Image (cartoon, helix red, strand yellow):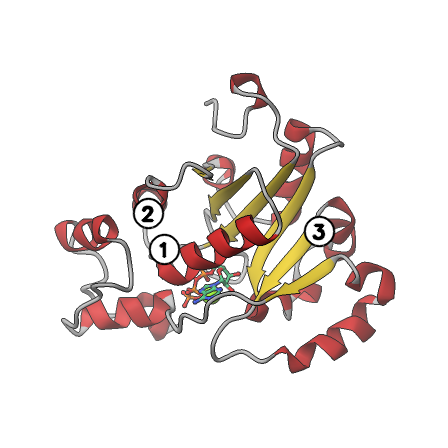
Amino acid sequence: MQHCTDPSTRSRPGRVGLMGGTFDPIHYGHLAAAEAVRQGFDLDTVVFIPAALPPHKQASQVTDASHRYIMTILATLSNEFFKVSPIELERRGSSYTIDTVRELRAVYGDETQLFFITGIDAILEICSWRDSGTLLTLCEFIAVTRPGYVTAGLNKLREALGESLFSRIHVFSVPALAISSSELRERVRKGKSIKYLVPEQVEGYILKNRLYLATDKKAEC
Ligand code: ATP
Ligand code: MG
């Protein structure tokens, strides 16, 4: 299947943001962070990449990939700079960022600058990611601030990675939105409103498909 990152369909952008996540569901915290980074780093586009299966989770712990993919498309429709790639869903199995970035590096070519966008919570775990050293040489990272997570751990990360690799990580302040997918799932399960926390189309999709009504699978594990 041809996907939106195929350069044959349009001119090749020079600066591309990659926003990986489970997006179960996607929410305004993800969208506001991606838009702030797009502007702040003068990116041509931000590609949202829903994970088939995050390496640290079982398949039964995440909502069906097709639902998460559709919600991500719905949420990004109104932003001409946002795209969604099924690259990890097509690969299936555990989604390793190193595989994704290698594939996209080949698609975009060496001259395109790739920026992988994560929250502070995710970047602090980067040493546990597969081939993290190589990954940091293939793309730069933009670690966005997130309510509830402090940047204090970054000093330890600097020591662990060394100055050269650590310099590939840019910490960036974005509007503070204390929203998480886990909390949204919990709210739906308890019958609470998720209005104004996710785009209206995503809210409608969740309600129509009766997602997250059963006991939160993640909370069980
Ligand atoms: P969960 O609670 O299930 O872990 P989540 O809200 O953290 O969900 P993910 O899909 O795990 O969402 O996150 C994808 C990326 O977006 C991660 O790098 C995460 O740190 C970042 N992120 C998520 N929510 C926010 C937020 N409110 N502000 C800034 N970054 C965020
Ligand atoms: Mg998370």
Q: Where is residue 85 in the image (x, y as percent from the top left)?
A: 47, 37
Label 3 or label 2, whichever comes before in sequence order:
2
The residue under the point 32% across, 72% down is: 183
Indicate left or right for 214 with 112 as reference.
left
Circle 2: residue type = Ala
Q: Is residue 216 visible?
A: no
State the mark number for residue 26. 1
Of label 3 and label 1, which has the lower sequence position?
1
Q: In which quarter of the image is the C terminus?
A: bottom left
Task: Determine whether 147 is above or below 45 in the image.
Answer: below
Q: Which quarter of the figure has residue 73?
A: top left
The image quadrant of residue 123 is bottom right
Amino acid on which disc 3 is placed: Glu
Q: Which residue is rendered at x = 20% and y = 70% of the image?
A: 189
The mark found on residue 75 in the picture is 2
Rate crowding at label 2 as few (under 14), some (14 to 19) or many (20 or more) other CA atoms within 10 Å.
many
Is 191 above or below relative to 45?
A: below
Q: Quadrant of residue 145 in the image?
A: bottom right
